[in-house]
Image (spheres, coloured by chain):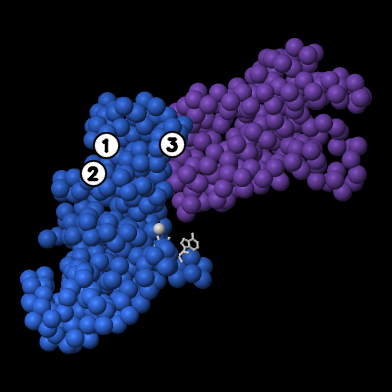
Chain colours: A purple, B blue
Amino acid sequence: MTGPGGRSSRTVWSHTFSDAMVMTRRNLLHYVRVPSLVIFSTITPVMFVVLFGFVFGGAIPIPGIKYLDYLMPGIFVQTVAFGSIQTGIGLAEDQQRGIIDRLRSLPMARSAVLAGRTLSDCLRNLLVVVLMTVVGLLIGFRFHARPSAILGGLALVVLFAFAFSFISAAIGLSLDTVEAAQSAGFVWVFPLTFASSAFVPVLTMPGWLQAFAKVNPVTITVDAVRLLFQGQAAGTQVVRSVAWMALILVVFVPLSVWRYRRA
Amino acid sequence: MRAVIEVEALRKSYGKVRALEGVDLTVPEGTVLGLLGPNGAGKTTIVRILTTLLEPDSGRATVAGLDVVDDARALRGVIGLAGQFAAVDETLTGRENLVLVGRLYHLDRAESRRRAEEVLARFDLLDAADRRVAGYSGGMRRRLDLGASLVGRPRVLFLDEPTSGLDPRSRIGLWELIGQLVKDGTTLLLTTQYLEEADRLADSIAVIDNGRVIAQGTAGELKARVGGERLDVMVAPASDVMAGAAALAPMAGGDLHVDPAEGRISLALPGGPPTVAEAVRRLDAAGVAIADLSVHRPTLDDVFLALTGRVSEDVG
Ligand SMILES: Nc1ncnc2c1ncn2[C@@H]1O[C@H](COP(=O)(O)OP(=O)(O)O)[C@@H](O)[C@H]1O
Ligand SMILES: [Mg+2]
């Protein structure tokens, strides 16, 4: 079987892979070169964990669970949701600088720019999640589950971030400037994270908001992670959460590839 | 000579804006075509279509025999592009930028490094090679950007306004570099708003206005369209201007203007500079004294004015 330009499909696949790796490496180099990028993308989550933990920690009693244990999964998911805005910003920045044009004129795989961006953001999220876990443990958060369930919960957070970064990518590639991508990011991430079970139980909200919050992928994912960290039966919530992410990927991967092609 | 770029009846609209309204172009192998036109003429749109960044609405275009739509991926393997604004990664060093491009042409690491080194040397960037591009001057960025378009050793190179925004010295430096590239046999399509630039770099010039090619030819052919050289004479005193005009009229072929207030006579010089001596003899014989005399060679500005009725700077 031969691919475009008469090359074997094997060559095409190995090029696609190497292009994605080259782009991932380039994005990661930015973090090495501009330490403030790493510091700000990790300091905010750590501040969230500490501040939310102490400020709300005593104020919101939730039956059957220590509030810090309730809150932490919410903060994890909220943090990576906000972090996903970075994906769109990074792409909008490359677009604004003309770098996407240059890349699109090269014989590289067209998926590689998106793959490189989402992969490097995924690695950053992994770092952020590990850091938040450590800080959370330091201020009194505790897992009540087997290691496999804990790892499953953390993996779910990273997968959630990966899916959300494609929503962000599609938006970032549709906008011309970094500033627009930044503002647009807040517009969709804010309602999703706050109208959810991240900080308070959905049942405390007015009815119309409950309807939204109950189907919100943030609620579903936070609930799934919470159950996993508490060592409770989480099967249904995990399936619902993964289904949401699959849906998001099925819609937004093609959409962002399409936006990239005609950027 | 074989055509390397062939464009037929190319059309492109952005919503209601008709950017290209049927463009035809041919560029023979190893030559330089200059697309000359004011801002908004459609130059960038043509370059973006030929480099597969944009699909045309209708018409056909091939580069090195490869169709811009059907063979897009293979086409990208034989071209180099430096867009209207330097597209380099500010956070990386100059060398890293070039190696990155080499890797994306699927050269192995060693070959990418070798080519980066070669480009850095050629573009006088070795000293700055391992510094971050954020600290480069505008001219250095342009050179790096141009260098990046050469890493893949393209058969066909596209440069969109390569010197816009540069100071005159950097511009002349870049012209020399581009001149050298062309000597190596690379086919080049270059867009510019600078008439002098097209004159200097291009074998053939296509004048673009409102999405159409309104004239094509060598710089000399285009200049011939506005007539040849002109002679400007200032006589002293200015009151002698009519006597001077009468003496020069027979050699002007009917194309002679007088500015009585300034004492200036401007006339066509169909015989070219060698006939200046005759003009001087005629004025001398008529007893008219010459205060100043100059031969004016038509520039591409004059060409643009003659073709569009507008001065190019007014539009830009
Ligand atoms: N993305 C775009 N959306 C809408 N109009 C555009 C876009 N790009 C270019 N145009 C319009 O198309 C015309 C040609 O533009 P362009 O090809 O950039 O000209 P040039 O490069 O000669 O300045 C202009 O009228 C310009 O305003
Ligand atoms: Mg342009």
Residue at 70% x, 18% y: name it: A133
Give yes or no for contact between labels 1 and 2 (Cβ–Cβ under 8 Å).
yes
Q: Position of residue A149 (x, y in %)?
A: 69, 20
A71 or B160, nearer to the observer: B160
Question: Identity of the amino acid at label 1?
Answer: Phe
Residue at 81% x, 21% y: name it: A53
Q: Label 1, on which residue?
A: B123
Q: Which mark is residue B177?
A: 2
Q: Position of residue B20 (x, y in %)?
A: 39, 69
Q: Which mark is residue B83?
A: none
For marks 1 and 2, the one nearer the N-term is 1
- Which element type, helix, strand or loop, lies under badge 1? loop
Left or right, residue A146 beside residue B51: right
Disc 2 or disc 3, which is closer to the eye? Answer: 2
How dense is the environment of label 2, judged by Cα within 10 Å: few (below 14), some, or many (20 and up)? some
What is the CA distance from the residue labelled 3 to the residue labelled 1? 17 Å
Left or right, residue B151 beside residue B246: right
Disc 3 or disc 1, which is closer to the eye? Answer: 1
State whether residue A105 appears in this view. Answer: no
Residue at 61% x, 23% y: name it: A39
Q: Quadrant of residue B117?
A: top left
A188 or B159, nearer to the observer: B159
Picture layout, residue A143 above or below residue B100: above
Give a yes or no on whether discs 3 and 1 share a subunit: yes
- Which element type, helix, strand or loop, lies under badge 2? helix
B302 or B122, nearer to the observer: B302
Q: Quadrant of the N terminus of chain A?
A: top left
Picture layout, residue B245 above or below residue A261: below
Q: Is mark 3 within 8 Å of ligand 2?
A: no
Picture layout, residue A102 above or below residue B238: above
